[in-house]
Image (spheres, grey):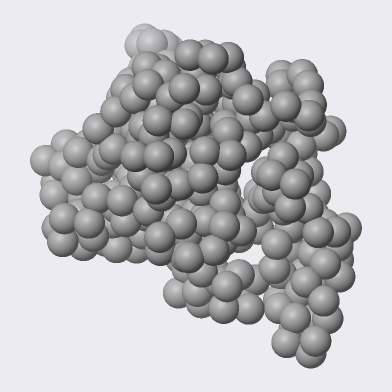
Amino acid sequence: MRFWFLRRFPWAVLFFFFLWPGDPAYGGKYSRPSGPQGVKAGLPQISITELISPALFFRKLEKSRLEAKEEKTVSLWQEFELLLQTLGGERSGPGYTYEDFRQAYAGEIKLVIPFDSTLPEKDKFAYKLSLLGYSAKEISDILTGRITRLALDRAVKMRQVGHRPKEVSDYLDRAYKIRREGFLWKEGLPGVLSKSIRGPAHLDDLAVRFSEQYDLNPQVIRAIIKAESNWIQEAVSPKGAIGLMQLMPGTAGLLKVDPRDPEQNVEGGVRYFAYLFKTFKDLELALIAYNAGPGYAERYAQGKAALYGETRQYVRIVKRYLGKERE
């Protein structure tokens, strides 16, 4: 007799199993709204504002925004978006804009990312690493298992005791775990190491025009475009970066350009790179920042990080195009 209710109303089991709105593993507060682009409806999701590590990065971003430092805001957004994608999956970022996040942290709307049982610990660990000064790139690589914190810390000690940068980077590359064979930017980009770095005439003209507008060497921008997209204006990376200069949608939004329009894509990308070059006053550091975020470039410049993985290869390829490969 104790289960007469279930015998009479069997549909109640389905209600409690599929529709009950809480999850005790994370405060019983995840929801099931439609979510951002790429997040499947019906899967467990959690409000972004419940995560502590992205909030830390967003506070820096918001401060920069309030100070009307547009390019700095873009650089901080790059790191915020990388961390968010690491926590919620590669497609967690592109569906939301800066304004969406501002409203979410102000309590005006609710934004979600996919939830899984490992997320709480990842979030806490990312927060701890952020407080210790690790960049978003390093945090992302640690959380995704591409490299260990022990290896990164050992590399710093190697630099401090006088090992050459190449030796330190070689050590990290041996420790680095790449999820796919080959490097990310080589996928779908045949001929990426061909001799010529010039693109089709109408696209090459854009690179030259905006390089001159922002006081940069056109050869540098040609090399970046060649490495980023191989001059394929419709190129879209697995993480959602778009076009010749491979701008993320959120980055393009902050730069106020349409990333699918070649002219706007190149103008926005060159403007952002010009800011990085002016900030770091060094080509290698600017390339590192463009590829992996300014936080990582700053740590590298201070001797607190070493170059490794895709970013190291990216810098090598661009330098090779420029005839500046020294190794």
Residue 238 appears in the rendering? no
Quadrant containing the N terminus in the rendered view? top left
Q: Nearer the viewer, residue 75 or 15?
A: 75
The answer to whether any part of residue 109 appears in the image is: yes
Return the residue nearer the eye: 49 or 244.
244
Residue 90 percent across, percent down from the top left: 53, 34
The residue that appears at 40% across and 63% down in the rendered structure is: 279
* Residue 103 horizontal side relative to residue 266, left or right: left
Q: Taking 99 as reference, is 32 above or below it?
A: above
Q: In the rendered image of this protein, does residue 259 appear above or below residue 256?
A: above
Seen at 72% across and 27% down, the residue is 196
Q: What's the residue at 61%, 77% (across, down)?
A: 304
Is 1 on the left or on the right of 121, as rendered? left
- Rendering coords of residue 111 (x, y %): 28, 36
Q: Residue at x 64, y 71 (%)?
A: 305
User: For this rendering, which residue is in front, 275 or 133?
Assistant: 275
